[in-house]
Image (tube, rainbow, N blue to C red):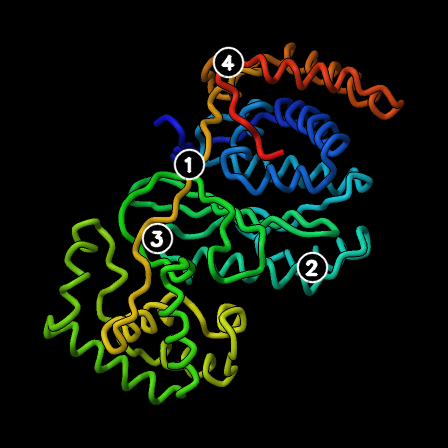
């Protein structure tokens, strides 16, 4: 699909010899970017899901694979921990590595003089935004954060086992409203998006409801469920959502587990949207309950539109050295090694004060037919 990056779930691994070449090429590209644009320029690129995909393509990974996220983050993480002079560091990763962000943040703070608590706030907000405040049918299985002295980029990926597709989320700001700098994937219907600017009134209702205490929330939830079961009110939005295959607005049962989560949330007593987003107990079920109450009782619905973005088409970058699975042609290690040598020469010349080769590289980029304007 032009202008987008589909991410079908792929299995398989990158051969060790190829991963080493990918890492060497990635390192030289990162060095060149930082030399010209600084670490902030690299972060701007990584905050764009399809710039990220283009980087993945250039180093030789499959152009449309869900494994793109895993491989690129692994490459960048290895580079950042080995080359501490570059000014950024990558934390987290896939599966069990997601839970190591706090531990790694403490070590990263020693390396780059970063604030580990600020890293954890960004990390937690990113996880909550992509799994609770936005509920789109994708379960997170990859969570990482690129941290540098002046900012961060959270990069996460979720999977939908029914459609066998993945979706990648990029967040570069500590805000609840519109935190995503981009979401890469296929737009597939209506969802629950409490992060949207069109959900602003609903979020204010969330705060008011939470301030009324857990017993009040449970009573309102039962009332909302009653309205939903009777079909008086809920039908005005549940029918089109069901037609699109989303079931986030089904009645929410006040189970013991949900009630405990609501009690945890109200004890925290958040006074702002950010405090609410970071509060204990705010999981997907609680957000669905608050959204149901907000809409049916207070007539303040959350936004249902899919927030996927499609800023550019990165497929052309697959022609740099080929792809692991042979698309558009089989990965060419000899070409990759030659590119690495050229990039090493360009970066070294720049460090010695000559920028002519970097300027020549930029002129070459502009010659590529149809090359999109990047974010750097």
Earlier sequence position, callout 1 versus callout 2: 2
Give the mark nearer the N terminus: 2 vs 4.
Answer: 2
> Label 1 crowding class (10 Å Cα cut-off): few <14, some 14-19, many 20+?
some
Q: Residues within 10 Å of mark 4 (few under 14, many from 20)?
A: few
Distance from Cα at disc 4 to Cα at disc 1: 20 Å
Q: Quickly name the residue at label 2.
A: 103
231 horizontally vs 286: left or right: left
**Mark 4 or 1, nearer chain start:** 1
Q: Residue at x 49, y 73 (%)?
A: 276
Name the secondary structure under disc 1. loop
* Rendering coords of residue 100 (x, y %): 63, 56
Please give the residue where the numbered disc 1 appears in the rendered image: 310
Q: Residue at x 77, y 15 (%)?
A: 357
Q: Nearer the viewer, mark 1 or mark 3?
A: 1
- Rendered position, 66 above or below 32: below
Quarter of the image where the N terminus is located: top left
Nearest to N terminus: mark 1 or mark 3: 3
Residue 307 lies, in percent from the top left, at 38, 48
Q: Which residue matches tag 4?
A: 369
SS class of the residue under badge 4?
loop
SS label for mark 2: helix
- Crowd around label 2: few <14 · some 14–19 · many ≥20 (10 Å): few
- Residue 122 vs 161, above or below: the answer is below
Circles 1 and 3, Cβ within 8 Å, touching? The answer is no
Task: Report which quarter residue 294 is drawn in.
Answer: bottom left
Residue identified by numbered label 3: 136
């Amino acid at each position: 699909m032009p202008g987008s990056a589909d991410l079908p779930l792929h299995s398989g691994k990158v051969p060790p010899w190829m991963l080493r070449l990918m890492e060497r090429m990635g390192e030289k590209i990162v060095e060149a970017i930082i030399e010209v644009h600084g670490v902030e320029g690299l972060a701007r690129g990584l905050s764009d899901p399809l710039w990220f995909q283009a980087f993945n393509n250039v180093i030789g990974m499959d152009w449309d694979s869900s494994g793109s996220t895993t491989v690129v983050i692994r490459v960048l993480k290895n580079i950042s921990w080995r080359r501490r002079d570059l000014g950024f560091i990558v934390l987290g990763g896939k599966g069990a590595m997601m839970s190591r962000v706090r531990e790694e943040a403490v070590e990263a703070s020693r390396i780059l003089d970063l604030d580990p608590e600020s890293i954890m706030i960004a990390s937690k907000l990113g996880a909550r935004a992509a799994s609770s405040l936005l509920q789109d049918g994708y379960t997170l299985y990859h969570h990482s954060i690129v941290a540098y002295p002046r900012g961060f980029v959270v990069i996460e990926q979720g999977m939908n086992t029914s459609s066998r597709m993945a979706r990648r989320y990029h967040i570069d700001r500590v805000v609840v409203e519109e935190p995503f700098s981009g979401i890469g994937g296929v737009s597939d219907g209506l969802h629950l998006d409490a992060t949207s600017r069109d959900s602003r009134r609903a979020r204010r209702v969330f705060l008011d409801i939470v301030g009324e205490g857990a017993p009040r929330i449970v009573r309102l939830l039962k009332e909302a469920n009653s309205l939903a079961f009777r079909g008086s009110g809920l039908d005005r939005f549940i029918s089109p959502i069901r037609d699109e295959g989303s079931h986030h607005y089904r009645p929410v049962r006040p189970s013991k587990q949900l009630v405990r989560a609501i009690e945890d949330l109200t004890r925290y007593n958040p006074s702002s949207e950010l405090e609410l987003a970071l509060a204990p107990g705010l999981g997907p079920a609680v957000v669905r309950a608050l959204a149901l109450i907000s809409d049916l009782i207070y007539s303040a619905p959350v936004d249902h539109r899919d927030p996927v973005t499609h800023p550019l088409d990165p497929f052309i970058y697959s022609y740099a050295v080929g792809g692991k699975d042979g698309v558009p042609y089989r990965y060419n290690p000899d070409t990759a090694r030659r590119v690495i040598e050229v990039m090493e020469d360009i970066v070294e010349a720049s460090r010695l004060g000559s920028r002519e080769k970097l300027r020549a590289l930029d002129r070459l980029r502009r010659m590529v037919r149809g090359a999109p304007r990047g974010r750097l």
